[in-house]
Amino acid sequence: MDKPEEILKQYWGFDSFRPLQKDIIVELLENRDVIALLPTGGGKSLCFQVPALIKPGICIVISPLVALMEDQVKALQAKNIKAMALTGGIAFKEVDTMLDNCIYGNYKFLYLSPERLQQELVQERIKQMQVNLIAIDEAHCISQWGHDFRPAYRNIAILRELKPEVNMVGLTATATLPVVKDIAQQLELKDVKILQKSFLRENLAYMVREAEDKNYYLEQLLKEHDEAAIIYVRTRKATIELEQFLVKKGISATSFHGGLQKTEKSSRLQKWLKDEKRVMVATSAFGMGIDKAGVRTVIHMNLPESLESYFQEAGRAGRDGKPAKAVILTNKSDIPLLKNQFLATLPGVDIVRLVYKKLNSYFRIAYGEGEGEEHYFNFYQFCLKYELNTLLAYNAMLLLDRVSVLSLSEQFQKKTRIQFLISGKKVTWYLEGNPQSDPVVKAILRTYGGAFDNMVDLNLEFIAGKAGTSSQETVKLLQQLHKEGIVEFEHHQHDTKITFLVPREDDITINPLTPYIKLQEKTKKEKISQVLSYVTNDRQCKSQQLLHYFGEKETEPCGICSVCEPTTTKLTREEMKKIYFAIIGLLEEREYSSREMTQRLPFPEDHMIKVLEILVEKGALATTTTNKYKLKHL
Ligand code: ADP
Ligand code: MG
């Protein structure tokens, strides 16, 4: 039998294991059930992949997201390891063939969505497989106490019946004690070994800062250094606006959200990873597989939705072990905002029913049909057509995804088609009167001979390039020609792919979801109240608060968070200068009280007060009758 180290070197090229990886692997090689808790990026995949490569047979991996599965399968295939992923949207016959390959084709890894596991065909074939290990990735999804409960995960226990002798490992980055217990119970783990790396991050200072003007405060925070940073915001629109704000302030920035096209996503990510762009402004869609060591600061412009997600996002700072900060910027408007934006957009049963019905009419799915069908569409246009609130509708669709009624993914697809409705001669006349249309029209006619006879698929970028203009301009021009009756023109930008997983049965599909929907609402409310308590509790060390939340009780105050930070540290000349310029900068706009300034500037209050005193003493500042400060020369 090969040694784990040899496998690690042979396939991954790494010389040594990371903390806890080896322990997990050893337990699995000794045929024990394991729950492994390692932070994101800690290297969980290796923990089941290495033992699976050592033992004869195939490893079954359950994972909640298609994208995660596809990434891992690709990574394995790149190492010449036979692996496949069975996700939704694959036809029955194909599934059959794929499973045959698994049994007879020496495959080492079979990735399955929990929905697939429900199918009898899949279950039958698994019985015939020589399975060496069952790995449950993102195992917290099985628990309703977790922040990411997926009912279909409950079906995983069927693997216990199918393969009673095979060991299981559940892997997760975030789980509280009740969730860990729940995982063990739901998976029916025997003599389970729980291996957990402490969630303590010694070099990471957790901060909660009150800031009236968040953008201004952010700017000051980013001026503390010139290293990489991530800023989390709630909406797609906010990513764009904040990126523009930072660029205007001379700070190198890019942005990221789920609605971007794949190529755009990876190009922006690459620029940030290579330090060509310094700051990444993102929604929580940013994070999967992000493994950048030198992030100095992670800033949340809004309150996070759960401490689990906060811990993961904040934890992207300081992976290199050097001092780093995770800051939440907050002010009075946050709490009502969280309640309005977040709780008010939790979909109730009625909304879920409505959205499901509308989706079925949109794609013209008849009663009893639709199972396995894939559809691309523009989410915004769908909402517009049925006058649905986009956030509510989106959350309703997410919910339908979670309960395995459908599978939702953000995928771009463009479709542009055109046909000329008038003769070639008339087109020539038209162009004489409208020379601005000439380059585009000629480029189309030269490229697509058939465009007079029927609708042809148009490659927009290609035509725009040929005509020496942009795709956007080309679309505008063609829409104009369409209005004038010269062409038939269709232009769709699809951003969402939906796969129906069960046949349409209206109330029979939706009614059973009621308890889950209620439960989700309750859990989300609890998660939010935990966030609020974290943000407002200024008596206990922030790091301790987080560690307690994740079940670590014996902890010491960290000494560096916004609760612990020393209130009277020595003020260096350098810092004094920084504070001095920041104060002058502020007072050039108008008068401020010291409290207002502290809320706008990222410096400790006592330092601010010290510098203010000196400035007043030296006669640079004066105080007003309302206890505000102003510049003396004004
Ligand atoms: P997780 O699932 O815990 O978030 P992954 O399994 O995706 O983490 O691994 C994160 C990254 O760490 C991957 O790029 C992986 O190749 C790398 N990695 C894992 N183990 C080691 C190791 N022992 N030495 C070096 N790199 C490792
Ligand atoms: Mg992982």
Image (tube, rainbow, N blue to C red):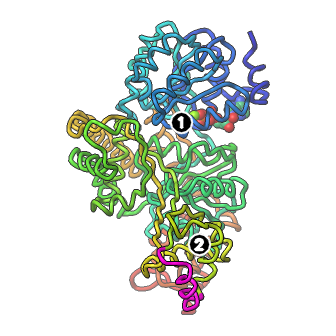
- Residue 1 in percent (x, y) is at 74, 9
Is ligand 1 closer than 8 angstroms to the Cβ of mark 1? no
Query: In the image, 432: left or right of 526?
Result: right
User: If you read the primary sequence from the N terminus, does the residue marked by circle 2 or circle 1 appear first?
Assistant: 1
Name which residue lies at 31% across and 39% down.
Answer: 523
Which residue is identified by label 2?
611
- Residue 570 in percent (x, y) is at 64, 59
Assign a secondary structure to mark 1: loop
Which residue is identified by label 1?
556
Q: Magenta stretch: residue 493 in it?
A: no
| Magenta: main secondary structure | helix
Camera-nearest residue between 294 and 150? 150
Camera-nearest residue between 148 and 407? 407
Ligand 1 - quadrant of the structure image: top right
Is residue 557 visible in the rendered structure shown here? Answer: yes
Name which residue lies at 51% across and 75% down.
Answer: 478
